[in-house]
Image: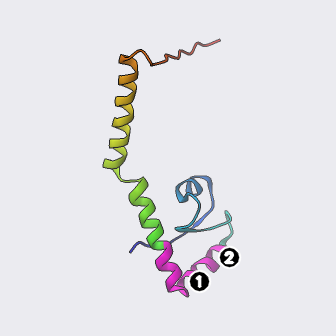
Amino acid sequence: MGVPAVAFAIPPVVEIADGGEGVLLVPPQDVTGLAEALVRLAAAPDERAQRGAIGKNQVLERFIVHKNMAIALARLGDLVHMKNTQQYVSVTFSRS
């Protein structure tokens, strides 16, 4: 089981939360809303378990280093293959 999260809905957190199913998001600087969200989760064991499980699955799917490295290496391999088969498009930038 994962641990549910409560956080302010600021850009980096919103991006990581990816829809907020595993994270209970509250408006930035809304301390009262943050406290209410914490109390809400404290009183709702089923919601805590559900949000915790969703959050854990999101982390396992998106933030595991070896998985992300495998994806990056596969993409790099695709680029090398494209360059070797002349399908690669080179882009250059110049300062004006």
Q: Amino acid at mark 2?
A: Thr
Who's the residue at 53% across and 84% down the image?
42
Mark 1 lies on a secondary structure that is helix
Q: Which of 75 and 1 lies nearest the eye of the viewer? A: 75
Rendered-image quadrant of the C terminus: top right
Q: Amino acid at mark 1?
A: Val
Q: Which mark is residue 83?
A: none
Q: Chief secondary structure of the magenta span?
A: helix
Mark 2, Cα crowd under 10 Å, few <14 / some 14-19 / many 20+, is: few
Give residue 36's position: percent from left, percent from top: 64, 80
Location of mark 2 (residue):
32
Q: Which of 65 and 87 lies nearest the eye of the viewer? A: 87
Location of mark 1 (residue):
39
CA distance separating discs 2 and 1? 11 Å
Mark 2 lies on a secondary structure that is helix
Q: Which of 27 and 70 lies nearest the eye of the viewer? A: 70
Q: Looking at the image, tell me whether mark 2 or mark 1 is earlier in sequence order.
A: 2
Give residue 41's position: percent from left, percent from top: 55, 81
Q: Is residue 8 positioned above or below 80 on the image?
A: below
Q: Where does the magenta region start and end?
A: 32-51
Who's the residue at 50% across and 83% down the image?
46
